[in-house]
Image (spheres, rainbow, N blue to C red):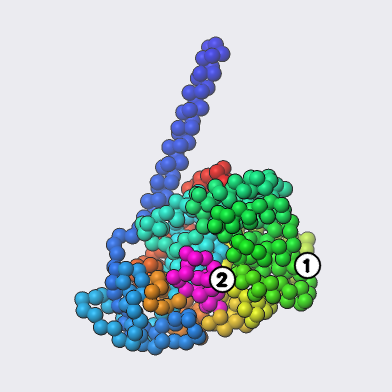
Amino acid sequence: MNINKLIKAGGYGLVGLLLIISIAIILILCWDSKQTSYLRVQGRVDTYIIKNVNIVPMTSDTILSNHDILIKQGIISKIAPDIFAKNIKQIDGTDKFMVPGLADMHVHVWDDYELGLYLSKGVTTLRNMWGMPFHLRMKKRIQENAIHAPIFLTASPKLTGPKDEGIDKKQVKDAREGKYLIGKYQKQGYDYIKTYSGLPSDIFDTIKDEALLQNISLVSHPSFEVPYEYHFSKPIKTIEHTEDIVQQVLKFTDDSLMLQKTIVKYVQTKIGHTPTLTVFHKISEIIEKDSDLLSENKTGYINPAFLAIGSQEDFNRWTSTKVYDSLVGERILKQHQQHLKIVKKMNDAGVLLLAGTDSGISYAVPGFGIHEELKFYTEAGLSHFEALKTATVNPSLVHQKLFRTGTVEAGKLANLVMAKENPLTNIRTLENPEMVIIKGQLLDKNQLEEFSEKAYHRSNYWATIIRLAEGIIFK
């Protein structure tokens, strides 16, 4: 065989291999889509009345006892002690409590299964914080009401500086590229731009200026390349992670003066803060429980690809650290307690706190995480009403697309959770909803249990790897 025939044969072989890989990818993704077909919206109930339910409106710390709620075409039409209407479906809410659906304002979504899992735990709004192309497709299907899912907002890929390496980040080489990327992500349909820990001031300045021109907001994982105070400026909407206040502002001390100055800045600028205490506390759980953590029931709800890669990396890091540093667990727990004190001080000062968990990262479990987060807020000293505000009212004040959520009032979206007990006295009752209503669509307890069961030990490792690879290549 001469050299030309050899090259030609090699070319055919390469084409054949690429064809086989392409077919395999299509089959894997189609199979994964079929496995989540239980989320497809089959029919719509447009008008109904929920009778005799106790309403937690979240407009104030009160209960509207034994009221009716009229819902029409996904909107709360009327609330009154007794609504009379003929030929309308009625749902008995006697002795139950109706609250606004919960928002988790810092998550990482890996698949459709998680959308159902969040709903099963009463979460009706998600703010995804690491955007990839598949999230834009997911968002489109949700907006078209093709699947049952929470309201879904997604960040862009994470923008960081040229020296901050990592496959999960988009390294921006200079200000010119930063300006280009803002326009690109805005046109692609991302809801906001995620800035990350390695952005230097010159690139960051350009990103902020261009975001203002493009009318798209920023959410910031604080950059270590600029002072923390730098983030208190438009168009930044929220600053993430209380742990970064401890690291960057306080330098791992108890500097009360610096903390107070930072809190004042939050109040003055009205920029929101997302504590994400849940994911940080997972470090303590890894150190304390070690391999027992891996066999816990909740671990089965974590996406299998991320569990094998990201979660395992965290596990290896902290279990190996404690081998040569016997005091690491004590330090991490002490910092967690410091986070609680900071959250309490921020709340008392009037900082706009947003419940966010970083679920989908480490061992923070989608859906379950929001209830851990709210528990930490009450442990910090917030009342149950104050804690609930962080997951209902407060998120509606941050993004324009959420302004019709967060309270139970006429004219608001019917995103609601029915609970067995009064969450103002027992916030943990929201962990197991009696019913969830998303954009007016009723999901009863049987459906919610199915959503949870389908997400448990799911077999979509390769489908996730494919979507992740797409995100890494096309960021």
Quick check: 70 above or below 209?
Answer: below
Q: Position of residue 269 (x, y in %)?
A: 64, 70
Quick check: 139 above or below 51?
Answer: above
- Three-letter amino acid code of the residue under disc 2: Ala
Kindly identify the residue that appears in the image at 29 percent across and 68 percent down.
46
Q: Position of residue 263 (x, y in %)?
A: 69, 74
Per the model, the C-alpha gap separating discs 2 and 1 is 24 Å
Residue 413, image quadrant: bottom left
Looking at the rendering, the stretch of residues picked out in magenta corresponds to: 387-406
Q: Is residue 394 magenta?
A: yes
Kindly identify the residue that appears in the image at 60 percent across and 46 percent down.
180
Q: Position of residue 124 (x, y in %)?
A: 45, 68
Circle 2: element type? loop
Q: Position of residue 274 (x, y in %)?
A: 60, 68
Residue 119, image quadrant: bottom left
**For mark 2, what is the residue?**
355
Circle 1: element type? loop
**For mark 1, what is the residue?**
251
Quick check: 178 above or below 323?
Answer: above
Residues 351 and 326: in front is 351
Kindly identify the residue that appears in the image at 50 percent across and 70 percent down.
396
